[in-house]
Image: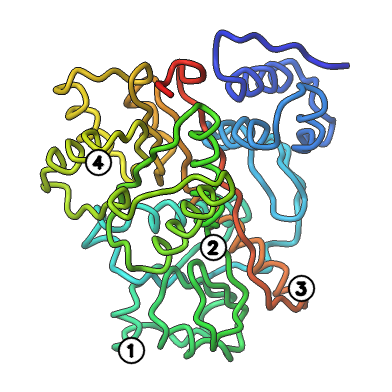
Amino acid sequence: MTAALQKHSPLYLQVRDRLIERIEEGQVDPSGKLPSEHEICREFQVSRTTARLAVEELIEQGLVVRLPGKGSYVRDRQPTSEGPVLRTIGVITEIDVESHPSRTTGCLMAIQGIRAAIEPLGGRIMLMSAERQQKGAVPNPDVEWDGLILISPPVSLQRRFKNSTVPTVLIGSRHESVTLPSVALHTFQMAFEAVEYLVNLGHSRIAVLASDLKNVGRRKLLQGYEAAFLKHTLSWSEEWKVEVGEEEEDVEPLVARLIDDGVTAFMVTGEFRISQVWDVLTRYGLQVPQDVSLFILEQDLSKLKRRPRYAGMYHDHSGLGRKAFELLGRMAKGEELDGQVYIEMPVLQEGETAGKCRE
């Protein structure tokens, strides 16, 4: 039987609240196992993304734990085992996250995902940067670790560990000479879907503002951006693809130029940049979403709540960490993995947008 939901609040929060009611009333399966995402979708008539967000809310609140390969369980009733196969895993990051937290937001969230997966099983991680590892200031991985996760490491480090005797998974872009199992954000598809969403609202002039347009992830993002224009036989201008630098950079001249060129929608990476764009639009007397649409491509879901009435898509870095740990577990059991796993990125439509943007 379908459980009817209301329209007054986000669907994933309503699904979360219904699941909390069942936990509190003892209506969950006697084993403590929650319904699968597929079962939640079918019962509440919601998307897979909504179901996933609802369960992740329960995990963040400490009510539920997700056990790789087994499902999600009420925290005090998860199945017991002889102990995790992966008791200690090394996590090597490209940049030292403690020294550069502002530059490593996605990396920190991936680490949170790894911790969320291993700690309920009694395991732990040993965290270090690629620089420390290359200087030899780390334990021997073949002796000290049960598994290894590399987060956006340099190519030299990818090659070094491709023949390691411990299970090793890469988070980020994999060099063509490396065959390590890896998980990566599908940035091409993310940009493609973002443009699709804006085109369906009536926009044909869409600008994208991002930093470092020459790196691999940004190039894929631009390819997806252009592919969506080509699908709809729309032309685009190279002037609409704008590179922005550090937080201190004044984006007003860039935004003003785009507005003068007739741009009616902005895709922006980074919450601080969309705040800047928002302020410029306000000074120009343009309203969101009545006059112009904003679409943010962000790393942290919580940051999407800071500005009302725009649409966004977030990079599920926590999901990358959980998926990497899941792959490690499969490797530890003897499975051979040599492919790349892409992570689906949920689209969040915030506030009133459809039908209110200028064509």
Q: Tag 1 or tag 2, which sits nearer the N-term? A: 1
Query: Few, some or many C-alpha atoms within 10 Å of disc 3 (few <14, some 14-19, many ≥20)?
Result: few
Asked whether the residues under the numbered discs 3 and 2 touch, taking CB atoms below 8 Å apart as contact, a structural biologist would say no
Q: Indicate the secondary structure of the residue bearing disc 3.
A: loop
- Looking at the image, what colour scheme do you see? rainbow
Residue under circle 2? 184
Residue under circle 4? 273
Asked whether the residues under the numbered discs 1 and 4 touch, taking CB atoms below 8 Å apart as contact, a structural biologist would say no
Nearest to the eye among marks 3 and 2: give it.
Answer: 2
| Residue 41 position in % (x across, y down) | 76, 30
Asked whether the residues under the numbered discs 2 and 1 touch, taking CB atoms below 8 Å apart as contact, a structural biologist would say no
Asked whether the residues under the numbered discs 3 and 4 touch, taking CB atoms below 8 Å apart as contact, a structural biologist would say no
Q: Tag 2 or tag 4, which sits nearer the N-term? A: 2
Which mark, residue 333? Answer: 3
Query: Few, some or many C-alpha atoms within 10 Å of disc 1 (few <14, some 14-19, many ≥20)?
Result: few
Q: Indicate the secondary structure of the residue bearing disc 2.
A: strand
Q: Find residue 359 and report its image quarter.
A: top left
Measure how far apart labels 3 and 1 are at the Cα level.
29 Å
Query: Few, some or many C-alpha atoms within 10 Å of disc 2 (few <14, some 14-19, many ≥20)?
Result: many
Query: Which amino acid type is marked by label 3?
Result: Lys
Which residue is more in the foreground, 342 or 111? Answer: 342
Which residue is more in the foreground, 196 or 41? Answer: 196
Query: Which amino acid type is marked by label 4?
Result: Arg
